[in-house]
Amino acid sequence: MEKRPVVLVVEDHVVNRMVVKAMLDKLGWHPVMAENGQQALELLASWQGKPPALVLMDCQMPVMDGFEATRAIRAREAEQGLPHMPVVALTANAFAEDSAQCFAAGMDDFLSKPLALDALQACLKKHAP
């Protein structure tokens, strides 16, 4: 059985999840889905085996937004001595102040919605070679 690298996709909008899943499948990645930041943290806490190569994190979600979830991921890495996991924001807002908020929360990069396949591919190559 082929082992494709895993990407954790954290996105509350079902259509956006379907689009990202289709793109990742096309690029040869294995998407694992979470609907909000809290669900993503629960998935990561119970993860068995090799952790995801990358997290694609929506910024605006109910229950727990992407900024809070990313801060929690970074705190967990520091507390448990875990390796840095790339977190890439998925945002409809690509303005300078929005990117600054992403980086301040501990995100490594951001992709604008609507997501383009070539931009996703370049991001995966950059952060999870």
Image (cartoon, rainbow, N blue to C red):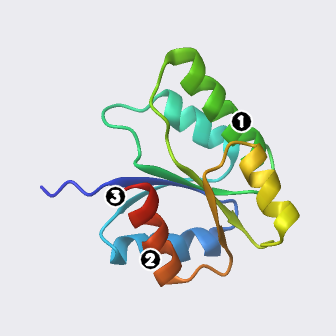
For residue 73, side relative to residue 24 (left or right): right
Can residue 71 be seen at all in this image of the molecule?
yes
The C terminus sits in image quarter: bottom left
Q: Amino acid at mark 3?
A: Pro
Q: Earlier in the sequence, mark 3 or mark 2?
A: 2
Residue placed under numbered mark 1 in the picture: 71
Neighbourhood count class around disc 1 (C-alpha, 10 Å): few under 14, some 14–19, many 20 upward: some
Tag 2, which secondary structure?
A: helix
In the image, residue 12 lies at what x, y percent? 69, 60
How far apart in space, not on screen, are marks 3 and 2 (Cα)? 17 Å
The relative height of residue 22 versus residue 97 in the rendered view (above or below) is below
Q: Earlier in the sequence, mark 1 or mark 2?
A: 2
Q: Amino acid at mark 1?
A: Arg
The residue nearer to you, when weighing 38 against 84, is 84
Residue placed under numbered mark 3 in the picture: 129
Residue depicted at x 43% and y 74%: 121
Residue placed under numbered mark 2 in the picture: 23
User: Which mark is in front, 1 or 3?
Assistant: 3
Q: Residue furthest right?
A: 97
The relative height of residue 97 versus residue 19 in the rendered view (above or below) is above
Residue depicted at x 44% and y 76%: 23
Q: Amino acid at mark 2?
A: Met
Q: Earlier in the sequence, mark 1 or mark 3?
A: 1
How far apart in space, not on screen, are marks 1 and 3 (Cα)? 24 Å
Tag 3, which secondary structure?
A: loop
The residue nearer to you, when weighing 120 against 126, is 126
In the image, residue 36 lies at what x, y percent? 68, 49
In the image, residue 63 lies at what x, y percent? 79, 44
Tag 1, which secondary structure?
A: helix
The relative height of residue 92 versus residue 45 in the rendered view (above or below) is below
Neighbourhood count class around disc 2 (C-alpha, 10 Å): few under 14, some 14–19, many 20 upward: some
